[in-house]
Amino acid sequence: RVAKPRHRPLTACRASSRITMASLLAPYPGKQYLIGGNWKCNGTKESTAALVATLNGAGDIPAWCEVVVGVPSIHIGSVMGTLRKDIAIAAQDCSATGMGAYTGELSAAMLADYGVKWVILGHSERRTNQGESSALVATKTKQALDAGLSVMVCVGETLEEREAGRIDAVVLDDHMAALKGKFSEAEWARIAIAYEPVWAIGTGKTATPEQAQEVHASIRAWLSTNVSPAIAKATRIQYGGSMKGANAAGLLSKPDIDGGLIGGASLKAEFISGIAAVAPKP
């Protein structure tokens, strides 16, 4: 496994009780996994406070992991004030427009102004339920990057598409192709790709490490050809199909799996203790 240089952000350090000025200033000298959580549309005030307390007490995060949680927008303020500082906060979507007469929208600039660092875009549930096209996801990604956010862009095929042999046609020729030529290399440095086989989300099914590795390698090859070899090497490609404590170590051991985008397990202490904590040291 080739170590990939990562710039360690201020939020990606050990538990707040162990933060030192030296650890804040010194980047981890190698690859950092990106362990993302997606809380989806879950949480009351009471249950969200309890989840924050659970994660705050879930143990140390290895220096080679950057951890981010996607919080429902209504809870971002309260979570930001109470969540341990070595976990960054992401929004689960942003608008394709800036501020203005767009009732009900939440702009990337608003999120950045509030202190949010990341946003999840193009999740399969939004592509399916809200009919979001790959072109729209690319437009939203540009809005987020222009506002200073980092982005987890989701791509992935359905079971029908996989069985029809259309994995590359969907993941590479549609989802990834919409991003081609849209961003500078400096902007690509703030993009992670989350491969989420739709058939493995919330179903209890998981792609084998070998199945996931095959698609991740294809995404990296696409990046090398269509962006640059340097960006292909540096881009973190997360696995987003029912990663949990029972399978995290096996998935993260693969050379092109650089983290996870985790749904159900991100609502438990397992997100830290069973996933981030077991990521193999590069």
Image (cartoon, rainbow, N blue to C red):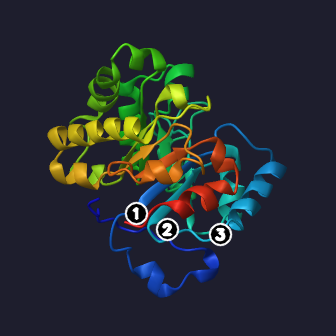
Using the image as rendered, state which of residue 142 and residue 98 is in the foreground.
142
Towards the viewer: 132 or 216? 216
Q: Residues within 10 Å of mark 3 (few under 14, many from 20)?
A: some
Q: Residues within 10 Å of mark 2 (few under 14, many from 20)?
A: many
Q: Position of residue 86 (x, y in %)?
A: 56, 68
Is disc 1 placed on a helix, strand or loop?
loop
Quickly name the residue at label 2.
12
Would residue 186 be visible to someone looking at this image? yes
The one nearer the camera, 90 or 23, is 23
- Dot 2 amino acid type: Ala
| Residue 109, image x, y percentages | 48, 48
As drawn, is 75 to the left or to the right of 126? right
Q: Nearer the viewer, mark 2 or mark 1?
A: 1
Q: Is residue 55 above or below residue 260?
A: below
> Spatial distance from mark 2 to mark 3, Cα to Cα?
14 Å
Which of the numbered marks, if any, corresponds to residue 32? 1
In contact (CB < 8 Å): disc 2 and disc 1: yes
Q: Which mark is residue 59?
A: 3
Q: What is the three-letter code of the residue carrying label 3? A: Gly
Quarter holding the C terminus is bottom left
Residue under the image location 56 percent in, 31 percent down: 205
If you read the primary sequence from the N terminus, does the residue marked by circle 2 or circle 3 appear first? 2
| Horizontal arrangement in the rendering, residue 58 relative to residue 236 (left or right) | right
